[in-house]
Image: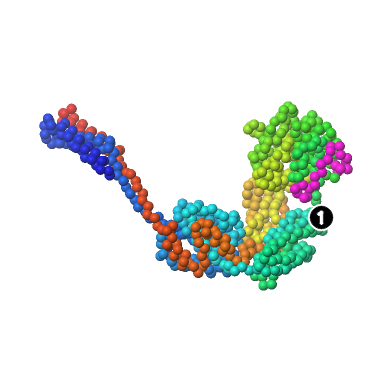
Amino acid sequence: MKTVTVLLILLAAIVSLCLVLFQYFYRGKKGKLQIVLGFLRFVVLFSGFLLLINPKFIKEEYSIEKANLIVVADNSSSIKTLEGTELISNSITQLKANEAPLNNFNSSSYLLGNRIIEGDSLTFEDKTTNISETLNSLNEIYGDASSALVLLTDGNQTLGLDYEFLKLDERIHVFPIVVGDTTAYEDLKVDRVNANKYAFLRNKFPIETSISYSGSRSVSSNAKIYLNGKLVFKQPINFNKNKTSARIETVLEANSVGVKNLSIRIDALENEKNTINNSKEIALEVIDEKTNIALVSSISHPDIGALKKAIEANEQREVKVIKPNSSINILENNDVFVLYQPNSSFKPVYDFIEKRGAGLFTITGSKTDWNFLNKIQTSFSKDSYNQKEEIRPVKNAAFSIYDISELAFDTYPPLDSELGDLIITKPYEAIANQRIKGVDLNSPLLLVTSEDQAREAVLFGENIWKWRVQTYRNDRSFKTFDDFMGKLIFYLSDVKQKSRLSISYENLYDGSTNAKISGSYFDNSYTFDPNASLNLKLTQKDSGFSREFPMLLNGNKYDVSLDGLTSGNYQFSVSVAEENLSKSGQFTILDFNLEDQFLAADYQKLDRFAERTGGRLYFPDQIGSLIEDLTKDNRFKPVQKSNRNVVSLIDFRYLLALMVLALAAEWMIRKYNGLL
């Protein structure tokens, strides 16, 4: 408490005492009653002065803040492959045995692999390693205090961002302990295989393969491609210390329909240690189907080129731009018709489509003849005001015919259309609705209809080329827009009755970690049913192993994870409870583990990362040096912190209560003794 405050309190006491002496003892009688009344008055006056002074004192608390010691051990199977399991176990044991020197740390242990787990129960069974995610999680937990992160790993990562360039809080310093073989071995590896998932019967399909070499001498080998176990391609290939990669390109012919297994292999070098990465397998489905699309237009417009490129992004489809007066022979060669801004010259095309029952995609705009269009078809009509307006798309989240979740309509520019009263006369589902000047209209911008197996889509606006450009701006790729157009064309070309049960899966899985089967079920009105019960029955062909899985609802589809299944060939069927509906298929799970692809620990990357974070690289035989360095490092010294609080000496509520009681007591005594 400050000296001035003490002096003020003494002064308050003296002044209060003087006032009491003057009031009760200077002229009045002196007796016990005056002493009691004087005391009560002194309490009131002194309490009032204390309220004005409000004395305070400083309360100071001290605490010791220790640095964090975070021990993270790699629990992935690559540690086992590189024979580093004992090194990690012994390193953890040695760190625990030196608890005394590390008493100045708050210690915690974690495991990294598929995900971060607290503890130190090592199994070395995780099929993936995500070092960056683990470090990010620890950064969020310990980033507000000085921390030493001891990372026991081989430095090989199979998932996530590259941890070498990860930015951690400046108070976290990483000290990697490299485990596993660090010797550099000669190795040939099939890095990547690029191929289409589908090919057309009697057509040729391309295959591109990247092969790399780790080593310093000149070597030769052979790259081979097997189709269903039969050698179909072979090419010699040479490497040296300067030429460490090669690309193999070839085309193969699809001679029969069905799923084809392609195996790309590179002959192993003499005494090559790791031959698991010398091959890759992919699956390709050969189909006897190609969709021809006629894009009919009487005008030139950028939309025509954008639609052609988007639709032909899928090699199963071919677009021909034709005039409305084309011959019947040209029209008969097409499965789907895209009619761009129809006018009266389109009458022969409409007559042909009505007889043929083909899929139809109508796009309207400023050049559309609405009088003709309202008369020639019965799906919709519009009373045009001949007033041009910009219309923004609003995604219909309830659209359930196929998946449109990847479309970012909220970023797409508006289309040009004409205002008017729009009437849709057929049952439809809107893909996107209209928004004009910030107002959402209960009117579709893009819709699809289906009636008597005839399917139709309508877009009430032009300049869709802007959507494709915006997709590239968003994703640096046209893929999202092209896939969307591909789904729309596929819907229009599928003239068969829509299946109420559909399934989605891959023919080939690299291990079971990311393997899953998805399905969708629609009720009698073809509305997605989120309350259905879908079950998957799975059988392994070779062993006869059989198992049933319930499919779980995930958004607008049902999923089942195949994680944990052994490699082999499987066949399955998906059925709906209390419905006579089922779909079947088959797939193959390869005996593949990405963690087995590594030959050595990546100590160089770990060293660079440690240097960036202010740490240092160690090896398992340097645990003693690590402990000594940590205990001597001033960054991790315990810090004494003080917490200073200014606290009021009195609580004004109690002091006011005391004043009230003293005044009340004084008044009652004076009243009782007739002094009032």
Q: Is residue 427 magenta?
A: no
Quadrant of the image containing the N terminus? top left
**Neighbours of disc 1 within 10 Å: few (<14), some (14-19), many (20+):** few
Residue located 68% across and 34% down the image: 391
Residue located 73% across and 37% down the image: 463
- Looking at the picture, which amino acid does disc 1 mark? Asn
The colour scheme of the drawn protein is rainbow
Q: Magenta residues, as a range?
A: 312-332
Q: With 520 as the anchor, is 77 left or right in this view?
A: left
Q: With 279 as the anchor, is 618 left or right in this view?
A: left
In the rendered view, tell whether residue 81 sits above or below residue 559: below
Front in this rendered view, residue 602 or 25? 602
Residue located 70% across and 46% down the image: 478
Where is residue 11 shown, x and y percent of the image?
21, 38
Residue located 88% across and 41% down the image: 328
Quadrant of the image containing the C terminus? top left
Where is residue 127 shown, x and y percent of the image?
60, 61
- Tally of numbered discs: 1
Residue 76 in sight: no
**Picture quarter containing residue 243?**
bottom right
Where is residue 175 shown, x and y percent of the image?
50, 61
Q: Residue furthest front?
A: 242
Front in this rendered view, residue 499 or 284? 284
Q: Is residue 315 magenta?
A: yes
Q: Label 1: state its secondary structure.
A: loop
Residue bearing the label numbered 1: 203
**Picture quarter containing residue 539?**
bottom right
Where is residue 363 shown, x and y percent of the image?
76, 37
Residue 640 in sight: yes
